[in-house]
Image (spheres, coloured by chain):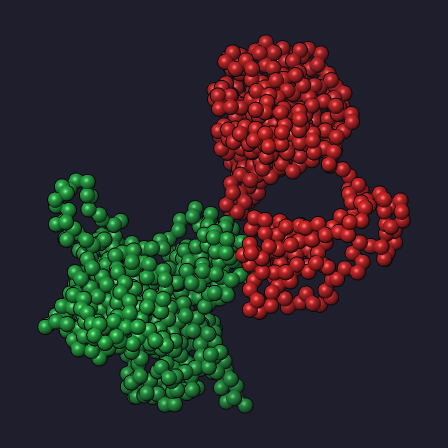
Chain colours: A red, B green
Amino acid sequence: MPNLTANLAGIRSPNPFWLASAPPTNSGYQVMKAFDAGWGGAVWKTLGVPIINTSSRYGAINYRGNRMVGFNNIELITDRPLADNLREIEEVKKYFPDHAVVASLMVESRKEWHQIVKDVENAGADGVELNFGCPHGMCERGMGSAVGQEPSVLRLITEWVKEVATVPVIVKLTPNITDITEPALAAAQGGADAISLINTIQSLMGVDLDRFVPYPEVDGKSTNGGYCGPAVKPIALNMVKNCAQHSGVHIPISGIGGIENWRDAAEHMLLGASNVQVCTAVMHYGFGIVREMLAGLEGFMKDKGFGRLDDFIGKALPNVTTWENLNLNYKVVAEIDAAKCIGCQLCYTACEDGAHQAIALPGNGQGRVPAIIEENCVGCNLCSLACPVEECITMVRKDNGAPAETWKDYMASGKAPTEFNDERAGGHGHWIPEPKAGLGRKG
Amino acid sequence: MKRAVNHSFIPSFLHSFIHSFFMAEYQTPTTEKDLETSFEQIKPYMNATMAYYESARCLFCYDAPCVQACPTGIDIPLFIRQIHTGNVAGAARTIYDSNYFGNICGKVCPTEVLCEGACVYNHQDVRPIEIGRLQSYATAQVVEQGRKLYEPGPANGHKVAVVGAGPAGIACACELRRMGYEVDIFEAKSQPSGLALYGCAPYKVTNEDVLEEVEYLRAQFQFRIHYGHPIESREQITELEKNYAAIFLGIGLGPTRRLGIEGEGLANCVGATEFIEQVKLDPLSVAVGRRVVVVGGGNTAMDAASEAARLGAEEVTLVYRRSREEMGAYEFEYELAKSVGARGVFNASPVAILGEKEVSGVRFIRTRTEGGKAVPIPGSEFEVACDQAILATGQSKRSAFLELIDGLDRDGQGRIAVNPETFQASNPKYFAGGDALNGGAEVVNAAADGKRAGRGMDQYISNSARGEGI
């Protein structure tokens, strides 16, 4: 039986699935219920001087019948008095001593930071998470992402916290920055024990076309919010990877962003996350989703022969390299399984209009299964991605078996194009129709 | 909702007794409310949530097979995408641009063998998109709102006559009005829509839906319909020819063809077209037999059988002279008839309708199919007892009327012969479409014909006018 016990910089939990600091961790009631349902840890809704929220706080992107593919919020930190939160933290810890309860914090002065760290430690928190990520509202007051975007300030505050903290300190990073490793490095240098990322991305969710007000609307006005949900996972994965691969950022990572099922969690962990935090999926489907996550991750570990999480945390990192190290002699070509093809011809129109005109339509009376024009196919994957049928279009390796050669090798051996009209251009000699042939054709 | 006898409360010795009285799936309706049960819509309107999720499933195929399968060539992926993006009026416009009977066709089209049958999802055993219902979802909304999508073109000074206010004639009138023609429709009956009203099965579309869509079209295109105005005489035809630049014949077909067998004149022996018309116009007045025999194997036979069963007939027997495979009706129509209790008998041909004053049965002779024809097997006669015989053996052509028109060629089966591109008849002043042309098909075919004929008439009249001008 695989062991799912997680350890983030010394914070232990029965499994790697934590609730992120957000509405689902607003109260002891919710956290108790979540632990009861199977969650391993919870980062409490950010504590500080309580705020006042707006009515109407969330917005969502629905895509072709799927709700909340992307989600945003303009909610601030906790609006409940600190004492109430502390009392509830204490009670949760009493019932669940082996579960991780981490207090997310956001205050301003050094004195406040010292005080609140001590308060939550006294309440029994297993760790603290410094909220330097919130990109709406609080940042206007010099907190949240305003700190996360200033590595020197981030480092200073981290140092303040470390002056008093006896439990591990996690620094939560904002993705609203050009290079995520800069604040990550500052956190490590400031003495943080771990980083968590990503917080939400600054966003406007759309505009009401009748009222001309973006969502979510508050009495005819709106403001930028924080974007999250399944749509942000790729951004999160890249940032987790960047931090995990950075030699200076040698502290553990808690992965956040678009995690809804065991696959998402496994991906975050393969790219270096020691555990994961979840919010939007719970806001959509409730705490019960953790059952699928636990069973899925356990099954994955069994299938792959992983006894513990450490067996696969970061396992994909060696396979993420820079572009210049990719093998240019590797070639795949699309292959259509005619028996599975339903004849929608989306591959044709995608390739024809969006790629390399490498798919031909059957002649009149020849059915509707398109054909790959192998000599035009550059192996871009587009057709296989657009195809609605499972495993109908596959990308098949069809290179000549030549040894790997990368852009770096090309540069060294003089095979790389250097002139504007260089004959060594990758697309030189590729068949492309004459411009005028594009007229009068059906789109 | 179907009513069923709740067996658990009935002592077992009473079962067979009660069964002999309560065999039918449906009871004879006696109130408007009963009719709603008997004729519950098989394709009810979608609500916004259904339409949202169903429209999300459309793949937006390239050169979509559903469009190719539609006789009117509606840009189906486009209108479904418009529904999904909340542009319902835009979707309706896309539909009406190709087919003026968008709502009716969404409900009565045999989508199983047209658009939905062509949906690529079928190839992976995924449920096809419910195109018909999405189509009705969009069009019914603009009809209900009376939202104007079209207006007549500026008057071009030409007048056109349309004979028959069925789907072909109305579609033709709409198309011509868009181009600025003045259009007079002459209709023998007191209501428009032809067989869309008098013939479509009541569980497929309601009379209200049919009439509202035609009124919606009339309000936009402002063609004139002269009701109770049959064109029957040579004098009337001469008058039309004198007053109108061209004439469209959307005259449909005549009454059910007689079989020429003994007993056809008995009370309770009715033609399917006439039976269905009564069901449509005054369903509570239909005295359906307890045991009904329907003769025929086409879609009209299936409708008549279903309607008889839904009106409370306890035994409905469909008898077709050839094999089940050779039956002209769509498979799903036969399944629909069976689902309400009809029973199929194949390879049997009617010999005589039996009875003194009223029908008491039908005598059949068994047949085998040879070279596509039903050949009687001597000595194999048998009788099916019944209280009503419905003959769904095809409608007659309106030959007597067509003979009044000079130089109007017909094909070997008595159908008006036209140029397939322009729908122009051999007498160049005449155009035709719908059942009179195809011998009896769907509303969608009539709608397609009428629209295309409208364009053919425009071409003809424009060319003639230019010729005169030179």
- Count all numbered tags in the image, as a single digit: 0
Relative to A33, residue A90 above or below: above
Percent coordinates x, y for residue B340 in the rendering: 27, 56
Residue A326 visible within the image: yes
The residue positioned 32% from the left and 68% from the top of the image is B323
Percent coordinates x, y for residue B230 in the rendering: 28, 79
| Quarter that holds the N terminus of chain A | top right
The residue positioned 13% from the left and 41% from the top of the image is B11
| Quarter that holds the C terminus of chain A | bottom right
Percent coordinates x, y for residue A250 in the rendering: 75, 23
Q: Residue furthest top?
A: A122
Q: Is residue A418 left or right of residue B100?
A: right
Q: Nearer the viewer, residue B348 or B29?
A: B348
The residue positioned 61% from the left and 60% from the top of the image is A370
Q: Residue furthest front?
A: B379
Relative to B177, residue B79 above or below: above
Q: Residue furthest left?
A: B356
The residue positioned 65% from the left and 38% from the top of the image is A234
Q: Nearer the viewer, residue A227 or B42?
A: B42
Residue A420 visible within the image: no
Q: Nearer the viewer, residue B455 or B373?
A: B373
Relative to B221, residue A385 above or below: above
Q: Nearer the viewer, residue B50 or A430?
A: A430
Percent coordinates x, y for residue B12 in the rendering: 14, 43
Q: Is residue B193 left or right of residue A144?
A: left
Q: Is residue B366 left or right of residue A82?
A: left
Residue A346 falls in image quadrant:
bottom right
Relative to B225, residue B414 above or below: below
